[in-house]
Image (cartoon, rainbow, N blue to C red):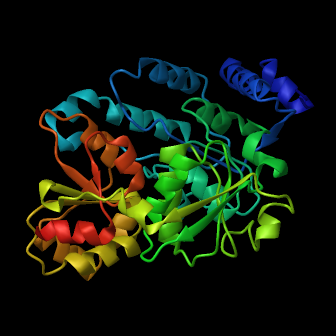
Amino acid sequence: MQINSEQDAILKGVHGEVISRALKTLVDYGTVFNAKRLVPIKSAHLAGSFGAVSYGAYFQVIDQMLKEGTRVKVPTTINPRPGRDVSLLNKIAFRKQKTLDDKLRALGVIQSYTCACYEHDNVPTAGACLAWAESSAVVFSNSVLGARTNRNSVLIDLCSAITGYTPEFGYLLDENRFGNVVVTIKINQMDAAALGFIIGQRIINGVPVIEHFDFSRSDLKNMGAAMAAAGNIGLFHVEGLTPDACDMHTAFAGAAPRSVITITQSDLNSLRATHLDRSNLIVFGCPHLTCKEASDIAARLAGKRLKKYVWLCMIPQAKRDFEKTRYYKLLDAAHVTVNCHCPLSALTIQMRRKKVLTPSGKLYYYLEGAEYGTMEDCFKACEA
């Protein structure tokens, strides 16, 4: 790997042992993927947001950084908290949460606590090189914003944050960002999250290009999150909509696709729960909801006699904005819980497992026992 003079000085320990180890880790990481150099990044996003008692090594690494006075070199945001207040088991499992929060603050990490960092605190420009963890944020940044990041892991993301570098491979390179699979759709009633889930299941190590459909920003977020969960997809294009796909020729750089798949209404419907009355908790917001998304849901639930528990999981800043709207008071009266934690972690540790219904393809994939429903299914289930 090519190392410039500044990086060489870091590796030799000029700026401290911790920074040297962090950069050496990135060099080793990049070498595995045949990266030719390290490149500077504009921002980082960390996945290690849980103050779990089992994360001893993670705390030790952060302590070493703080002991040397290390701080992040670029704007760095952090994933959601795990929801300590949900149950006694969560309080025990995540009892080091405040300790972790304090340590991250001391490192200079922005206290965003959301998987949708791109909505408020960490908004990259097209073409910017990043070092992000969190699969749903990675795929949105690459696909919808046109920035460039690989799907980094816990500690790799932190090494990049404190050094300001990431190895150049994968989605940072032009040749890996072109589409290679065409997705045609024969769908009467679009459900973007379900579409993303099916694409994730059917495409392995590919960059799908979906034929034109007028998806909203919210659709793109939820579709990408489902793709990333169900199929480890880090980049997709939509013909005539996403920034790198003004047309099919551009999306494929003039090359022929390796395959074409068709997804039908029947495929989407196959994910849906058949008995909506079985659920006792409806969860919206994985990835986190914006203020507009929460307001749209609230408008549908306001004045209804809800028979199920309902969670809205929101970006913290969006929740603060939402609390100032009339919709928040309406939901409060309907006993809807509005929170900012990660619904997956909040619901994973349970003595008596809740029967969850969700319109999130990501949560459906990861949460054992969860069932999937369209937005309309979930609204109906609230009153069933």
| Quarter of the figure with residue 287 | bottom left
Figure check: 353 above or below 128: above
Is residue 77 something one can see in this rendering? no
259 and 222: which is toward the camera:
259
Figure check: 381 above or below 36: below
Looking at the figure, which quarter contains the N terminus?
A: top right
Q: Is residue 340 left or right of residue 255?
A: left
Is residue 131 something one can see in this rendering? yes
Q: Which residue is drawn at 13% across and 54% down?
A: 278
Q: In this view, does 127 lie to the left or right of 98?
A: right
Q: In this view, does 186 lie to the left or right of 280?
A: right
Please provide percent x and percent y for residue 307: 8, 65
Please provide percent x and percent y for residue 250: 82, 67
| Quarter of the figure with residue 71 | top right
Q: Which residue is drawn at 24% across and 34% down?
A: 349
Please provide percent x and percent y for residue 171: 73, 47
Q: Which residue is drawn at 35% across and 49% down?
A: 364
Figure check: 356 above or below 276: above
241 and 142: which is toward the camera:
241
Q: Residue at x 75, y 51 (%)?
A: 258
Q: Is residue 359 left or right of residue 228?
A: left
309 and 56: which is toward the camera:
309
2 and 100: which is toward the camera:
2
Figure check: 152 above or below 302: above
Looking at the figure, which quarter contains the C terminus?
A: bottom left
Label total for image:
0
